[in-house]
Amino acid sequence: MRIVFIGPPGAGKGTQCKRLTQMLEIPHLSTGEMLRGTRKESALGRIVSGYIDGGRLAPDYLVMRIVNKRLLESDCQCGCLFDGFPRTLNQAQMLDEQLAIKNNRVDLVLDLRVGQEELVSRLLKRASIENRADDNAETISARLRVFFTQTAPLLDYYKGQGIVRHIDGTRSPDEVFAQIRSCVQATKPKHG
Ligand code: ADP
């Protein structure tokens, strides 16, 4: 099964993705992690850091290059969970094209919802615990703005395919996961 997990920064995607990949035994493809993993000392790494630290999206061509390479690996052949990707309409269309080459498609889109005020307070709390460079007040508001302007419209694209399920992200982690599990169980992966 191929699942796209959409949710604003701070909605709890990371926690839920971990649980979901364990349940389904599929790889977790987090483009944020992949991008952070490009070595800081390389020229590419320096370019990527500039985008991440400014709370801006990395360019589509760069993200697609990393994702497409990862999709060729053997563990991704039976499915995967996309976390933080696609983030633009262009990425979503390119992902569909890439999957179609092997007669595959996105089976389910999870839309994790949390209000803006709650998101900001969660992110500032996380900043004080994890010390993530992009969790400061300025970058947080940039990332939220990017999400609501560039990523949220993706939902319309996937709604057109009839595969979006909404998840109430304000509940406890267990309750959120219960909603996710029932959406996954109601989804039949399609091939071809
Ligand atoms: P969060 O969702 O909490 O912002 P992520 O780890 O998913 O955290 O992303 C961190 C940063 O990495 C983003 O703000 C962006 O700069 C970059 N990034 C991650 N995924 C993508 C993507 N699919 N396209 C463009 N940029 C991305």
Image: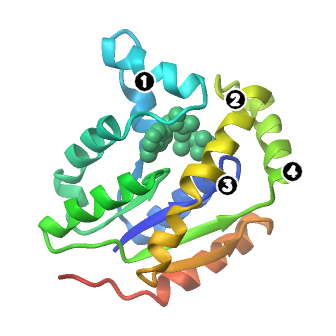
> For the residues marked 2 and 3, what is the alpha-carbon distance in whole angstroms?
18 Å
For label 2, the SS is helix
Q: Are dots 4 and 3 in contact, CB under 8 Å?
A: no
Q: Are dots 4 and 2 in contact, CB under 8 Å?
A: no
Counting residues from the start of the chain, the first of labels 1 and 2 encountered is: 1
What residue sits right under mark 3 in the picture? 12
Circle 3 residues within 10 Å: few <14, some 14–19, many ≥20? some
Q: Which residue is drawn at 48% across and 54% down?
A: 83
Q: Residue furthest left?
A: 101
What residue sits right under mark 2 in the picture? 139
Q: Does the residue labelled 1 lie within 8 Å of ligand 1?
A: yes
- Disc 4 marks a residue whose amino acid type is Glu
Q: Which mark is residue 117?
A: 4
Q: Is mark 4 within 8 Å of ligand 1?
A: no
> For the residues marked 4 and 3, what is the alpha-carbon distance in whole angstroms?
14 Å
Q: Is mark 3 within 8 Å of ligand 1?
A: no
Q: Residue at x 65, y 27 (%)?
A: 132
Q: To which quarter of the image does residue 175 belong?
A: bottom right
Counting residues from the start of the chain, the first of labels 4 and 3 encountered is: 3
The picture places residue 107, in percent across and down from the top left corner, at 37, 77
For label 3, the SS is loop
Q: Is mark 2 within 8 Å of ligand 1?
A: yes
> For the residues marked 1 and 2, what is the alpha-carbon distance in whole angstroms?
15 Å
Q: In this view, does 139 lie above or below 90?
A: above
- Disc 3 marks a residue whose amino acid type is Gly
Q: Which residue is drawn at 50% across and 26% down?
A: 51
Q: Nearer the viewer, mark 2 or mark 3?
A: 2
For label 1, the SS is helix
Q: Which mark is residue 48?
A: 1
Could you tell whether 59 is left or right of 117 in the image?
Answer: left
Circle 2 residues within 10 Å: few <14, some 14–19, many ≥20? some
Counting residues from the start of the chain, the first of labels 4 and 1 encountered is: 1
